[in-house]
Amino acid sequence: MLSNAPTPIDPGPTCSRPPRQHTAVAYVCAEDDPVSVARYTAWCEQRATAEGWTVVETVIDPDDLVPLTERPGWQRVTRLVTDGQVGVVITINRRMVADSATSWARLSGLLQGLGVVLTAGGARSCPAPGGTR
């Protein structure tokens, strides 16, 4: 007799999260200006949609004078990356996460080593996850 019960390898109906390489976190570091934050957030969403990525969270930090690793928002991004929840970090421009080209390259390399793409503006410093563009 056949059963409709799920098999042990069946993920069931609750597994609807996209694969990690298709998920992104949007990171915005801007003063508490609602217009700028809304525009930056919308841009990240549009970029993700165009690339076929799903933004699982948008993280906002209000002060770029605080070192990156001390920003609460960036700490959240780091947790999403290390927990394997995202494959892409999208930001508006490199200055939101790095103070120089060398810092950008270092951060991009660290994330790439974890299987995560860092992208800003129209730049694509490394291939998109899963070979998608």
Image (spheres, rainbow, N blue to C red):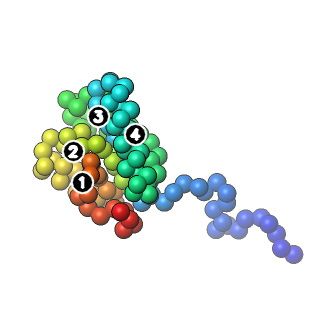
Q: Between residue 44 and residue 1, name the one nearer to us.
A: 44
- Residue visible at 82% across and 69% down? 3
The picture quadrant where one finds residue 37 is top left
Q: CA distance from mark 4 to mark 3?
A: 14 Å
Q: Between residue 6 and residue 40, name the one nearer to us.
A: 40
Residue position marked by numbered label 3 in the rendering: 29
Front position among marks 4 and 3: 4
- Residue visible at 48% across and 60% down? 19
Residue position marked by numbered label 4 in the rendering: 42
Above or below, comparing residue 104 to residue 31 in the picture: below
* Crowd class of label 3 (few under 14; some 14 to 19; many from 20; radius 10 Å): many
Front position among marks 3 and 1: 1
Residue position marked by numbered label 2 in the rendering: 94
Name the disc covering residue 123, or none: 1
Above or below, comparing residue 113 to residue 104 in the picture: below
Which quadrant would the N terminus be assigned to in this image? bottom right
Rendered location of residue 41, percent (x, y):
38, 38
Q: CA distance from mark 2 to mark 4?
A: 17 Å
The picture quadrant where one finds residue 59 is top left
Q: CA distance from mark 3 to mark 2?
A: 11 Å
Q: Secondary structure at mark 3?
A: strand
Front position among marks 2 and 4: 4
Rendered location of residue 125, percent (x, y):
23, 58
Q: Secondary structure at mark 4?
A: helix
- Residue visible at 40% across and 47% down? 46
Which quadrant would the C terminus be assigned to in this image? bottom left
- Asked if residue 72 can be seen in this view, the reply is no
Q: Earlier in the sequence, mark 2 or mark 4?
A: 4
Amino acid type at image mark 3: Cys
In the rendered structure, are the residues bearing label 1 and label 2 in contact, judged by CB atoms less than 8 Å apart?
yes
Amino acid type at image mark 1: Ala
Q: CA distance from mark 3 to mark 1?
A: 18 Å
